[in-house]
Image (cartoon, grey):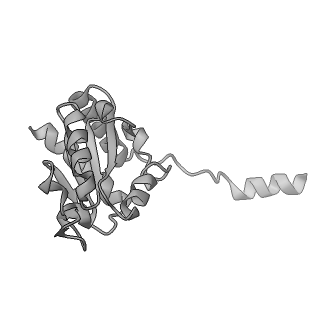
Amino acid sequence: MLRTLFRIVRTGVVSEPAPPPAQALRQREALQQDILRIMGRALCIRHVDAGSCNGCELEIHALNNPRYNIEGLGIKFVASPRHADMLLVTGPVSVHMEVALKRTYEATADPKLVIAIGDCGADGGVFGECYASRGRIANVIPVDVVVPGCPPTPTAILQGIITAITARVGD
């Protein structure tokens, strides 16, 4: 027992001082306040697969994991375009998905934002425009932000979402 007490006295206080405030946390709060000011509630996103290979979907799903914690920012995915403020569209628009994409766009309440995800959404990718593909998403519906990449990282997708929101703040 004495040996342990001497060791404690020799070692002294080993706890670390509290860290300084993190500026990044304040940016999260500011972003969350911007979302609430613009939308009046959490930002609701409807994902639409217009014909992708599912590479972009895997990266979008990664946004929901604890590392990115988009629900902590006040951003969540919804099952209906009628409850959505933003459409996250992946893939080149296949001919069979063109009407469904237009209907989804029209069903989304104003003000709505559209983000094209991936190289296929940006410019048609390797599929381009052909008998089975309308090519990029902007050929079918208006697009606010394009996030290139094959597939883009979750960080790039989150940057695209934040870019679309902050652009709306500037309007």
Q: Residue furthest top?
A: 40
Q: Is residue 60 left or right of residue 147?
A: right
Instruction: State the residue at coordinates (23%, 57%).
Output: 95
Instruction: State the residue at coordinates (81%, 55%).
Output: 6
State which quadrant residue 107 falls in.
top left
> Which quadrant does the C terminus fall into?
top left
Q: Residue furthest left?
A: 171
For residue 40, above or below residue 140: above
Residue 111 showing in the rendered view = yes
Residue 148 showing in the rendered view = no
State which quadrant residue 7 falls in.
bottom right
Instruction: State the residue at coordinates (36%, 61%).
Output: 56
Q: Name the one closer to the observer, 12 or 86.
A: 86
Q: Name the one closer to the observer, 164 or 1.
A: 164
Instruction: State the residue at coordinates (42%, 40%).
Output: 71
Q: How many labels, in total? A: 0
The image shows residue 146 at horizontal and vertical percentages of 20, 57
For residue 158, above or below residue 32: below
The image shows residue 27 at horizontal and vertical percentages of 30, 43
Q: Residue furthest bottom?
A: 126
The image shows residue 133 at horizontal and vertical percentages of 22, 63
Q: Name the one closer to the observer, 27 or 51.
A: 51
The image shows residue 106 at horizontal and vertical percentages of 19, 36
